[in-house]
């Protein structure tokens, strides 16, 4: 059984792939899951908001809501599939079959790449991470459209609880988003877009740990039936993982570039992902970091570098990518 920290290997020797990346595979495989059942949103209030200053959904199809964990998990898998389809021919086969597993822990906000007992790679995320990404998406979309400050309200509300000894949930508390805005289809669609964009950076980062060889278990085709779930609890309770700073910096760089490559590839038919989602998630981690001494429950802060260091790194990776893709 590999020790929990085994996925932090030595810095890879391979140089970055030559830019531009190979043309993304024309998969055409991306489709959103069918629209879920009608939303149990609160009824809109009597005073609808004034017209939004921006309409980011203009010229793009309106997307339906992502409601609850099963929908979020399905969305993560669809986003990851799209990310993999846009990797280079060298990296794609290494992660083509890597499963994504979810830990039901609502009081941890984390995602990681590791190897199971049989040496097969997997990527894991906690329920708390999905809760946070949903809440960030809902609040950011609302603020963007209506000029509100709901993201700040959310982060200030939940961060102290999440890092407290008893732990706390990252779920969006009721009332943060004014009821009048809940049903706005532009808001729902924009939240869906931001959810995908944020998930893309998160899982782009984790997948890169595998295809860059940091975990050591993804250099050939992955097995189909990992023991990942059985080991999850042990991984999450085995104490703080030490992290390998060079590997984390590489993963942020590759995750960002994979997100932007995929965004470009999909831009003809869907929202073009940017680095914005990843930066917003890192901003949320920074709120957690500032809220107090890192709780052992918030393993993201122990297994990854300080978010204040990661943000400029992702911004630099994105700037470099944009220069190469004017
Ligand atoms: Zn990492």
Image: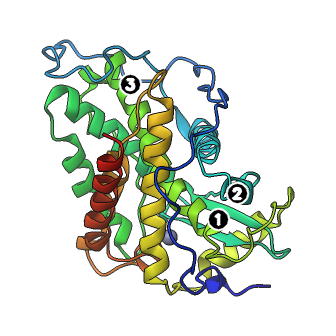
Looking at the rendered structure, the secondary structure element under dot 1 is helix
Residue 6 in picture, x, y percent from top left: 66, 84
Q: Is residue 158 visible?
A: no
Q: Nearer the viewer, mark 3 or mark 1?
A: 1
Q: Which of marks 1 and 2 precedes in the sequence?
A: 2
Residue 172 versus residue 31 in the image, above or below: below
Tell me: 102 left or right of 168: right
User: Is residue 251 or residue 64 the one in the foreground?
Assistant: 251
Q: Secondary structure at mark 2?
A: helix
Q: Position of residue 111 (x, y in %)?
A: 54, 63
Some atom of ligand 1 lies within 8 Å of the CB belonging to the residue at label 1: no
Give neighbour class at mark 3: few <14, some 14-19, many 20+ (Cα, 10 Å). Answer: many
The location of residue 112, given as percent across then percent down, is 57, 67
Q: Is the residue under label 1 in contact with that under label 2 (CB below 8 Å)?
A: yes
Residue 307 left/right relative to 103: left
Task: Name the residue located 75 percent from the left edge and 69 percent from the top edge.
Answer: 219
Image quadrant where residue 116 sits: bottom right
Crowd band around label 2 with a 10 angstrom C-alpha radius: few (<14), some (14–19), many (20+): many
Secondary structure of the residue carrying tag 3 is helix
Disc 2/disc 1 C-alpha distance (Å): 6 Å
Residue picked out by circle 3: 188
Q: Which residue is mark 1?
A: 211
Which residue has dot 2 on it? 95
The residue at the point 21 percent across, 26 percent down is: 145
Quarter of the picture containing the N terminus is bottom right
Which quadrant of the figure contains the C terminus?
Answer: top left
Separation of residues labelled 2 and 3 (CA atoms): 31 Å
Residue at horizontal 80 percent and vertical 65 percent from the top? 220
Label 1 environment density (alpha carbons within 10 Å; few <14, some 14–19, many ≥20): many
């Amino acid at each position: 059984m590999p020790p929990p920290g085994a996925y932090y290997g030595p810095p890879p020797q391979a140089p970055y792939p030559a830019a531009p990346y190979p043309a993304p595979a024309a998969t055409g495989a991306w489709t959103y899951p069918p629209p879920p059942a009608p939303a149990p949103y609160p009824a809109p209030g009597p005073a609808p908001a004034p017209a939004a200053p921006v309409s980011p959904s203009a010229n793009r199809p309106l997307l339906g809501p992502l409601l609850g964990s099963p929908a979020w998990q399905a969305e993560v898998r669809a986003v990851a599939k799209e990310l993999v389809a846009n990797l280079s021919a060298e990296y794609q086969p290494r992660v083509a079959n890597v499963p994504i597993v979810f830990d039901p822990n609502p009081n941890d906000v984390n995602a990681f790449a590791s190897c199971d007992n049989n040496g097969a790679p997997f990527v894991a995320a906690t329920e708390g991470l999905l809760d946070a990404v949903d809440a960030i998406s809902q609040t950011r979309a609302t603020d963007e459209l209506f000029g509100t400050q709901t993201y700040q309200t959310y982060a200030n509300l939940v961060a102290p609880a999440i890092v407290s000894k008893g732990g706390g949930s990252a779920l969006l508390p009721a009332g943060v988003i004014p009821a009048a805005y809940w049903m706005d289809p532009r808001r729902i669609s924009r939240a869906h877009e931001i959810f995908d964009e944020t998930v893309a950076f998160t899982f782009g980062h984790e997948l890169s740990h595998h295809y860059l060889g940091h975990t050591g278990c993804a250099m050939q085709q992955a097995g189909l039936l990992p023991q990942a779930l059985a080991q999850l609890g042990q991984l999450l309770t085995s104490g703080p993982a030490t992290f390998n700073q060079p590997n984390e910096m590489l993963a942020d760089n590759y995750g960002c570039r994979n997100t932007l490559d995929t965004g470009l590839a999909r831009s003809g038919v869907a929202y073009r992902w940017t680095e914005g989602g990843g930066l917003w998630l890192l901003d949320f981690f920074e709120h957690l970091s500032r809220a107090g001494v890192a709780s052992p429950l918030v393993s993201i802060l122990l297994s990854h570098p300080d978010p204040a260091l990661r943000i400029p790194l992702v911004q630099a990776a994105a700037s470099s990518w944009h220069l190469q893709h004017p």
